[in-house]
Image (cartoon, rainbow, N blue to C red):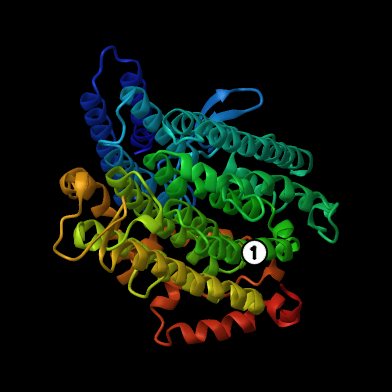
Amino acid sequence: MATLLVITILIPLIAGLGTAFAPALSRDQARKIALGTVVVTLGLSLILLVGFRPEVHGPQFAFQSLDGHYGLSWIEKPNIRLAFGLDGLSLWLFVLTSILMITAVCASWESIGERAPQYYGFLLALQTGLLGLFASLDVVLFYIFFEFTLIPLFFLIGLWGGPKRKKAAVTFFLYTLAGSLLTLLGVIALVAVHYQYSKGHILTFSIPELTSGLKVIEWDAWYDTGSWTSPQVLIFMLLLAGFAIKVPMFPFHTWLPLAHVEAPTAGSIVLAGVLLKVGTYGLMRFNLGMTPRGAEAMFPLIAVMAVAGVIYGALAALAQTDVKRLVAYSSVSHMGFIVLGIFAFNATGLDGAVIQQINHGLTTGALFACVGMVYERYHTRELAQMGGLWNRFPLLAFFFMMAAMGSAAVPGLCGFTGEFPILVGTFGVAPRTAVLAATGMILGAAYLLWMLCKLLFGPLKEPGGHDAHPGETGHGGHTSIPGIAWYEIAGLSPLLVLIVLIGVYPPPFLDQSKQGVAKLVTELPPQAGVTVPSTHDLARAPGGPKPLIATAAATTPMAAASPGDRP
């Protein structure tokens, strides 16, 4: 299975290079190769998913040397290894990447005409970058894939984006590069601290070894986080710099709306659905996993940034008239919830954050795909110019509505299974923070319902100033506008199935991540209050969610000591 994991990561890159540099490859051939590649990659990812054993601690599908180290030796000195594996924190992000790439290829089927082989080549290369990043077990390998993802997305935005594509591409690239360099300094500092103060002075870049080793190093100052100049707090802030931009957390979000609006539809799907999760995955893997006391010390700052992002993103979305920009700002709001769950310091919040990463990828990916389909037909995204589209495109409107309801956390759909545990977990640590964040759910329902009412319902209204009534066909050139095509249905249907399935029956999805969350929580410092039962256990408890809230308040020392002092 270790070989299968490596093959799964490399297949898109090999196919992408072949597509981009093949002589005289037509658009039709390029898109068929791309679709075949992402389907095969998804099939292999599902085999890994089925073979994943949730009861096993530690990474799975990884090569191991005779001395117990993960991966194969790559650079002997300083011991950098080609190490890949999946655990409960990375498994679903790996699978999500494979699912959303099918949607991205289908959304590009007719919209990409010029330089199609190169376009699909960059898209497939981006998939390899993301798969490799989530599967990396070596910090240097992680950083290489982290930076590699910038290159294909830069070209996707810069060459196939909207009128301001060059500005959007450069802004995205510079923001992310600047933050990632600070994160690199943080990673180097972690390796240096581990080498200097670990027993035996072990130089390692292995993520599992660093995560466990930094918990027991013999350096008293490492455990003292009483000031901003404490070593662990400083390293936490360096790591945060890059991941906060990737999320993006408020106020580092300013690059995101422009990048979303100017990116081609597939770029927006991958950017919102997967690339933003690189930030939250990094926060879990590095900030919480390797600098937990720094995370606890900086909780007030993180909470303020997360809640500000939730409320600001929702209010900004309410003010938009461009439907794609509205969905972009909704990402800022919803990603704030995920950050809150990560830093709730208990299994409930972390369970919610892990599953909400998947939920957000599904719903926002579907929303961007639907927006792209509307734009391809009308060449506008202005809500004032459209309305009543259910009368003309009932199936597309149905997909649009289900994705929006899932994003609004309607019970029975996926968003609720993520945001509710996040709020419960946060309430046990900081009640006021949870209450403020809950207003984001109300605002989210407001802007999403407003968007649906303006866009889908009422009399048919199409660009050009023509208002039609149900049964009319529109005017002028709009009489020949095609309905939803097979490739659009193929791209949206898997997302819709998962949006409903996760909302109705989430335990199978939580089961796979249970050990990863449990391992992360049990290694948190005692004062972080980690004995709150998990969402997985709660789902099977006869008392339902009510005992969880009481337990969270009772077993979280931070909440018991000074709940009012938290933001």
Q: Quadrant of the N terminus?
A: top left
The residue sitting at the top extreme is: 23
Total marks drawn?
1
Q: How many residues crowd around disc 1 within 10 Å: few (fewer than 14), some, or many (20 or more)?
A: many
Determine the residue located farthest toward the left in the rendered image.
Answer: 471
- On the question of residue 454 being in view, the answer is yes
Q: Position of residue 241 (x, y in %)?
A: 69, 46
Question: Of 388 and 60, which appears nearest the observer?
Answer: 388
Residue 118 image position (x, y, % from top left): 36, 23
Q: Please, what secondary structure does the residue beneath circle 1 have?
A: helix
Residue under the point 63% across and 84% down: 554
Q: Is residue 160 left or right of residue 151?
A: left
Kind of residue at disc 1: Ala
Residue at the disc numbered 1: 308
User: As rendered, which of 215 and 273 lies closer to the eye?
Assistant: 273
> Going 71% across and 70% down the picture, which residue do you hit?
527
Classify residue 42 by image quadrant. top left
For residue 353, above or below residue 80? below
The residue at 55%/47% (across/down) is 256
Can you see residue 421? no
The quarter of the image holding the C terminus is: bottom right
Question: In the figure, residue 206 lies in which quadrant?
Answer: top right
Please report the residue visible at 53 percent of the width from the left and 44 percent of the height from the top: 258
Does residue 43 sit above or below 112 in this rendering?
below
Q: Position of residue 210 (x, y in %)?
A: 64, 44
Where in the figure is residue 36, as x and y percent of width and height?
Answer: 23, 33
Q: Is residue 149 depicted above or below 400 in this figure?
A: above
In the image, 564: left or right of 512? right
